[in-house]
Amino acid sequence: MTSVVSSEPSESGSQTLTISVGPQHSGSGHMRLIIEMDGDIIIRASPDPGYVHRGTEKIYELRNIIKNIPVIERPAIIDASNLNHAYIRAVEELQGIEAPPRAQYLRCLLNEMNRITSHLYWLSIFGVFLGHTTMFMWPLGDRELIVDLQEKLTGARITHSYIVPGGVRRDLPQGMKEEAIKRTQYLEKRLEEYDKIFFENPIFTARAKGVGKLSRDEAVKLGAVGPALRGSGVDYDVRKDEPYAAYPELDFNVCTRQEGDSYARSMARIDEIRESCKLIRQIVQKIPSGPFRRKAPIVVPRGESYSRVESARGECSVYLIGDGGDKPYRLRFITGSYRNMAIIAPVLIGGHMADMPTAWWSIDYWPVEADR
Amino acid sequence: MSASQKARQQPDEDPIAMLADGINVWIGKLGDIVHTIVDRTPIRHVINWGRIYSLWPVNITTACCSAEFGAASGARHDLERFGVLPLGSLRQSDLMVVEGTVTNKMAKRLKMIYDQMAVPRYVIAMGDCSISGGLFHDSYSIVNGVHEFLPVDVYVPGCPPRPEALEQGIIMLQEKIRSSKVYEHT
Amino acid sequence: MTTPTNIPSLEREDHILDQLKEKFGDAIKESRVSRRSRPEVTVAMEKMLEVSRFLRDELGFDRANGAGGADYLRDQKMEVIYHVSNLARKETRDIILSVKEIIPRSSPKVNSLVSIWPSVENFERETYEMYGITFDGHPHLEKLFLIDNWDGPPPLRKDVRIPTD
């Protein structure tokens, strides 16, 4: 989107100032924002993506379906298993196979752990943006507890490549169930401490409430997804609207807030961390026994399939066209951040320059995921 | 002397110019002497000690490896105990950690950032993508390795490297600085 | 192995396709239901704008999930595929309708659907730069990711091979 005009310049007819923010900044990932300002108010904003565009859609056509798994995971590396899950569901649909129930539960377990670690990373960078260094350190420290669980389950800290056609690569190790319950209970207690130092901190509420308002109609019209959409009151979550894997049998709520400002989007994410902790405990207690992987061929049969998954930043979808070989003929990959590129401008327009970090980061736009 | 005689005098015969040239040469030699003294005596250790324990990186998070750089700066693997603290503008940074894939579009800007950093400046290439293109080596929009346009001091392989590997890379850079001369790095 | 009673009914999907075929007749080149919640329809290029308006206003597909292209070099054709769904009614949020149009490879030009679903703006821009397909009526048809990154022909076309060394 090159420009969105939403308000006229001031009546004095003074000139507007165009500045460019980035690509080097203290956030996460390179993206440039071209902002036009009238005094201190932003009147136009357009994102300039492409600094991390690695041409993955061409690479997917050159690698076979197993070798594609690491390439699929890299756009949102801290949320890797959600992207992996979307891709493998598309492959399995074409192959006409379904993973055994134990594998479905294990897939959901890793997805929820990734969701928690992704939101905690978002929170710590939020602390950096707002100059709250305790909020930079605490979530990263607590995130390490969940990353340890991920490493115990899959063998890797963040790039798991755990979900394969036919199931998952490894079974649930011994002792994981008790560890998961203990750590998620600890994390829920820590979230109350975060409330005390950050979310109920008058400095944060003054900076985030009423800032970056996105109305419900605008969010729906522009195709926003994830917590950025749910913070404006729309209860759209793929896990509830088109349940996949083990989610039909699990009990959780979709976290929405009504106000549509940065505070609402942030609190929608924190509520999601709580729900994910509950989900993890349910999964380790209800997981059925049985095989965790079945044989699947390394071939993409002729046909088309479309699968979608709720990743940490929103709906991630894979459209796969196969031609009978072992490589995809066409893999169209649209991630949550790419969909949310459309709402960057409306969220920033009308606000002050000093509000820009809060408003922008509350969308959780991850440039690497959008550029792929 | 008359005015015409002054005008006909050769420039290198002008006593003041000769004195100025002499002083320039002497100051140049004095500069060399200072460099040699600083490089050979314990002053070098003191200056290098100051540089080693305050490597301030530029705030750039190139691509996915930045997740592990962020985790390394966090609570469990604290990079600040090595003196690595992303603080302030890039003009006062002396370390650039290239975390991840370098695209054609970003390569120009990385060079601009590198040129603006203060001397001495060091570059750590973190992750397979910045060493050789890594997982995306046959992509149409990336540079296969940051050494194509920047001088790299330490390579930290991995996809992504664990925070412990990054710490090892920083320790290696510190060893390299400890044994290098003060005025040799640009 | 599923028993016959487990096969889900495809009534909703068939009903959507029937309504489209009834209204537009020959403009609907192909239609099928690949599985539950996934109806697919191929529309003639010239009628795409009308069909999309009908989908949004009459059948309630108020949201576009994505848009992309595909290149079939052997058949000398390209495809533009839109995926649309409905957000307002909770019970049918799971249905995703694939709407395709086939265009000749030698002159790839189609109508833009930004006036119907504003969320496809960035996706059409990307399809333009990756395949060279022009979208008439798009508000800002320019390159999105490839500026300064790649100057050659549209990279996702099947006859563009990227040299690796």
Image (spheres, rainbow, N blue to C red):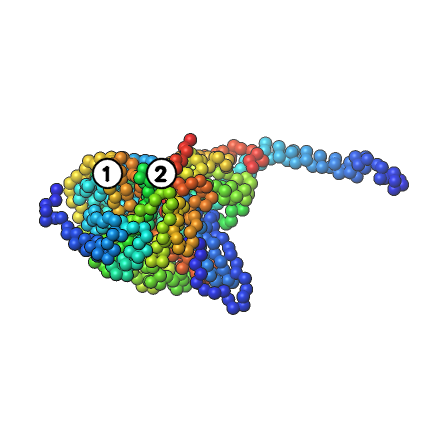
Q: Is residue B41 left or right of residue A245?
A: right
Q: Amino acid at mark 2?
A: Lys
Q: Position of residue A370 (x, y in %)?
A: 37, 48
Compared to residue A164, the image places residue A213 above or below, namely below
Quadrant including the N terminus of chain A:
bottom left
Q: Is residue C35 left or right of residue C68?
A: left
Outermost residue, front side: C26
Could you say which is closer to the camera, residue A92 or residue A204? Answer: A92
Quadrant including the C terminus of chain A:
top left
At horizontal 31% and vertical 37% (from top left) the residue drawn is C74
Q: Amino acid at mark 1?
A: Pro
Tell me the CA gap for discs 2 and 1.
19 Å
Q: Position of residue A151 (x, y in %)?
A: 29, 41
Q: Position of residue B89 (x, y in %)?
A: 51, 49
Residue corresponding to mark 1: A301
Chain to which the residue tagged by mark 1 belongs: A
At horizontal 59% and vertical 33% (from top left) the residue drawn is B39
Outermost residue, right side: B2
At horizontal 43% and vertical 50% (from top left) the residue drawn is C142
